[in-house]
Image: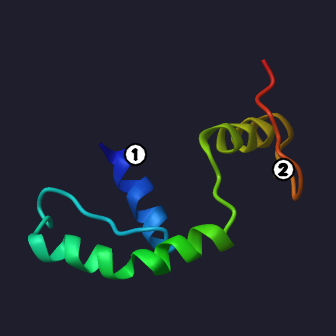
Amino acid sequence: MVEQCFNALYLERLNYGMQADMMTLEPALLRRFEERLPEFRASIARGHFCGNDLVFGLVDTFIRTGTLPVSGTPKVVE
C-alpha cells in the first residue's frame, strides 16, 4: 500500500496523472482527470518515463558502485 501511494505521488508530481484513493474518490475527480488528460499525455511524451527494469537497474548500480550513472540504461547484475 505504501509503495502505491509513493508511486501515485511521484506520477502526479511528474504531471503524468492524478493521485487518488478511496478517501478522496469522488465523481468530480474523474471529470477533472479527463479535462487534464491532454496535459498528462503531453507530459508523458516529453518526459523520460522510468519503468521497473530501469529503476531496479539504477538501484542495483548504486548499491554496487555507490554512484548513479548519468547515461545509458543500467541492468541488474545477477
* Kind of element beneath mark 1: helix
Label 1 neighbourhood size at 10 Å, few (<14), some (14-19), many (20+)?
Answer: few
The image's colour scheme reads: rainbow
Label 1 or label 2, whichever comes before in sequence order:
1
Nearer the observer: mark 1 or 2; the answer is: 1
Q: Which residue is mark 2?
A: 67
Residue at 81% in and 24% down: 77
Q: Left or right of 48: which side holds 25?
A: left
Residue at 67% in and 73% down: 46
Specify the quadrant that holds the N terminus: top left
Label 2 neighbourhood size at 10 Å, few (<14), some (14-19), many (20+)?
Answer: few
> Above or below — where is 46 with respect to 22?
below
Amino acid type at image mark 1:
Glu
Specify the quadrant that holds the C terminus: top right
* Kind of element beneath mark 2: loop
Percent position of residue 27, x then y: 10, 71
Q: Which residue is mark 1?
A: 3
Percent position of residue 9, x then y: 41, 64
Residue at 14% in and 64% down: 25
